[in-house]
Structures are given as structure tokens and as C-alpha cells.
Amino acid sequence: MSNKEVGKVLKLLASLMELHGENDFRTRSYSNAAFQVGRVPEPVISMDKTTLENTKGIGKSVAGKIVELAQSGRIQALDDLLAQTPEGVAEMLQIKGLGAKKVAVIWQELGVETPGELLYACYENRLAKLKGFG
């Protein structure tokens, strides 16, 4: 697994954490680590936890998740968050210009769970009624 792929996994984890209202500091640290992983010249997947923790932008928690990913090919916390998230909502996180906070508002306040439902809500101008969308 390349550093770019590890970064994408960490970015998805950060987005889902934000979507589900996790602590802002934690979500930001995972998001920053996702960016920093891409800048590391050697493969992070082959580093041990101590080396990862000493890498700029990667703390203990993130290092543990990278080691978990290296050993099992998965991150349990990511699997748990994906299980709590409708598939279409996770897809909406990929829409350019829509961050996790906006997707959370659309999902929780309008009940929109797919990109198709989002398009329909746009046609009906339902998003304009939401705070921060006007």
C-alpha cells in the first residue's frame, strides 16, 4: 500500500469522524496526518510505531492506526464508522465542495442519504433553507 493510499484511508477516517461529531482536535489530527503521510519519502506502512510517532504530523493515535492497517489491512475504527454510515452518505463525502460538516447537516436535517436524493433536494431548493447553505 502506497503512502498516497494510506493518506486516503486516513482522510476518509477523518471525514467520517467529523460526520459523526467526533472531537474536532482528533478529526483535524487525522486529516493533517493524511496530508503528512503523502510527504514522507519512505513507505509508512513498513515503519514501526515508534518511527511513525517521530514523524512530523503523526501522533501516537494515528501511528497506531497505520500499524493496524499495515498488520491487518483494515482499521477497525473506520469499519465501525462505515457500518454506522449509509453508503450514499459516504459517497457524498466525495463530492467536491461538500465537506463532512455540510454532508452531516444534509443527512441529519433533510434525511438525504444518496447523491441522487441530494440532486433532487437541490432541484426542490430544500438546501437553501438550511443554515449556511443560503
Image: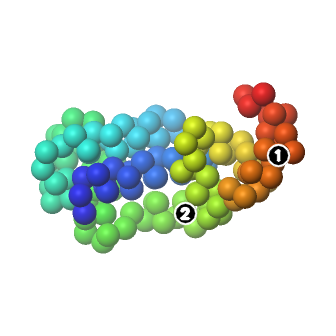
**Residue type at the position of mark 1:** Tyr
Q: In which quarter of the image is residue 45?
A: bottom left
Q: Which residue is found at the position 38% from the left and 52% from the top?
A: 8
Q: Nearer the viewer, mark 2 or mark 1?
A: 1
Q: Name the residue under label 2.
A: 82
Q: Position of residue 33 (x, y in %)?
A: 32, 41
Tell me: residue 73, above or below residue 65: below
| Dot 2 amino acid type | Leu
Total numbered badges shown on the rendered structure: 2
Give the labeled residue for mark 1. Answer: 123
Q: Residues within 10 Å of mark 2 (few under 14, many from 20)?
A: some
Quarter of the figure that contains the C terminus: top right
Q: Give the CA distance from mark 2 to mark 1.
A: 28 Å
Specify the farthest residue to the front: 123
Furthest toward the bottom, the residue is: 72
Residue 59 position within the rendered picture, expressed as x and y whole percent measured from the top left = 29, 41
Report whether 42 appears left or right of 61: left
The mark that comes first in sequence, 2 or 1, is 2
Mark 1 crowdedness (10 Å alpha carbons): few <14, some 14-19, many ≥20: few
- Horizontally, is 47 left or right of 95 in the view? left
- At x 64%, y 61%, the residue is 88
